[in-house]
Amino acid sequence: MDAQTFNARVATPTTRLIGALAIVSMAWVVIGGLFVTPKDVDQGDAVRIMYVHVPTAWVAYLAFIVTALASACWLLSRKHSMGFDRVAGASAEVGVIFMAMTLLSGSLWGRITWGSYWAWDPRLTTTSFLLVTYIGYLAVRGLGGSLEQRARRSAVIALLAVLEIPLVHFSVLMWRSLHQEASVLSGDGDIKMDGSMLTTLLVGVIGFTCTFAWLVMHRQRVLAMQDAMQMTQLDAALRERASESAIEGSRLT
Amino acid sequence: MDHVGFIAVVYGATFAVIVTLVVRTLSQGRDLASKVADKDKPWT
Amino acid sequence: MSTQLSLGRVARAVAAKDLRIEMRSRVVVNQVFPFAGLVMVMFAFALDNDDVLTRVAGGLVWLATLFSLIIIIQRSFAVDTADGALEAQRVAGLDPAGIFVGKALAVMVQLVTLEIMLFVAAVVLYRVQLHADGAVLLVTCVVSATAGLSFVGTLYGGLTAGSRGRETLLPLLMLPVVAPVLIGATRATESAFNSGGAAVSDGWPWVGVLVVFAAVFGLGGILSFGSLIEE
């Protein structure tokens, strides 16, 4: 039996629009960040990293919130609509990558401004914890079992993570305050910005958010199709099994 | 520009990763879409 | 018609069962306790400085506790999954919340015993000096930290228990979550030991963190354990 080929289109007008917005914004960020904006009074050229670092950090945290909200929606919705579960998963996948990029850009910025690639700053430490938590969440999603089991387990894990992260952040905050950290470590966004700098930063946030939305929507579609294929294969296997036993049954009579 | 190396790595890595993600997601999507019936696609 | 056993009765029965199994098999006592002692010795090899060891003794005790907790949790669920006993308990209609509290209680008892042993080891190996005025702080710290660790461990242990190589996921899921306990318990313990000049009074805010943590995950576990052990 030949496999039927279907329409290979994955885009919709919404994703095309979001995608276009993202591309334009990113171009603005690159040109603005690297060429148009001036050096910062205190940081010099290091501030250019901020045009990328701040939006990726924002997206990473947004992704975490989306995963948590989608997980809650799945748990609370009576028919447990799988779209919520797929959005939760897709958002986490994109989020973990943006989290890693945030830590990379932050680390390189720190090397220039503080002289070291790392500091036990509460924000940095909590961010790296968030990264590890994402990795754990994605590992739980990979545990196998039925789609419903996957959705339930990961939803619970995501909501436990929502409890855990503030606790971690608060403990680290209390811990570092014992060491009387100088304010130089806490000021990574407190810079006086002139017009073009602020605009580039805002456009960056919008552009990266659009990129996030585009990626999550498309990734969620890929997951939907993967799940559908899994169900079709399962149905086919069951039908085969049923017809086998029917043949056996008719042989016995 | 000072610290060109660091800035180049940050911009380069970030956009390289994003472009790779976009391309991979699109090609995965198109590949799967040709194998899956339209009724299973929530956006159609 | 089924009679729903109360959460308390289920918990007590499950805890008693787990502890009875341990008393008969002595797996934790014979294997995990020596492991923990060994970890304390290896810290001395790695850190190679008597003053440093005395100073960081609090942290080392809690690190050794965390590593041992992973093994204790895996053991706690291994006794159930070997013959599908966890499934049987669930299918029999036992309130999962009761199973959760019961298993956590059993873990707590084993863990506290381990910690007492580790504190003795710290006094002997790292030359920690115990003070009477730090005693209340230390006891409160141990109880609240152990409760939090047992709740988190039992919760994620329930998820990662079973076949198909899920156990390796336990440390990855658990250790980030218990970081506040490590931070809080270590600071409180250091205050109790007067390590590096820390005053006993400095330790109490940390005990507060530990108590909040235990409450959050005790409640969280009661609500979610059932969903996580469903097969």
Image: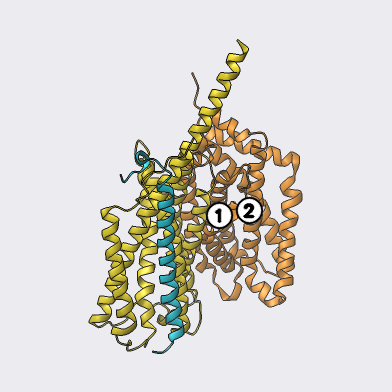
> Colour in which chain A is shown?
yellow
Q: Residue at x 62, y 52 (%)?
A: C168
* Amino acid beneath label 1: Met
The answer to the question of whether label 2 and label 1 lie on touching residues, with beta carbons closer than 8 A, is yes
Chain in cyan in the render: B
Q: Is residue C145 left or right of residue C33?
A: left
Q: Residue at x 39, y 42 (%)?
A: A82
Quadrant where the C terminus of chain A is found in the figure: top right
For disc 1, the chain is: C
The residue wearing badge 1 is C174
The residue wearing badge 2 is C69
Residue C98: % across, % down:
53, 36
| Sooner in the amino-acid sequence: mark 2 or mark 1 | 2
Q: Is residue A161 left or right of residue C154?
A: left
Residue farthest along the top direction in this orientation: A253
For disc 2, the chain is: C
Front tag of 2 and 1: 1
Q: Kindly state the secondary structure of the residue where label 2 is placed.
A: helix
Comparing A117 with A208, the one in front is A208
Comparing A228 with C31, the one in front is A228
Image color mode? by chain
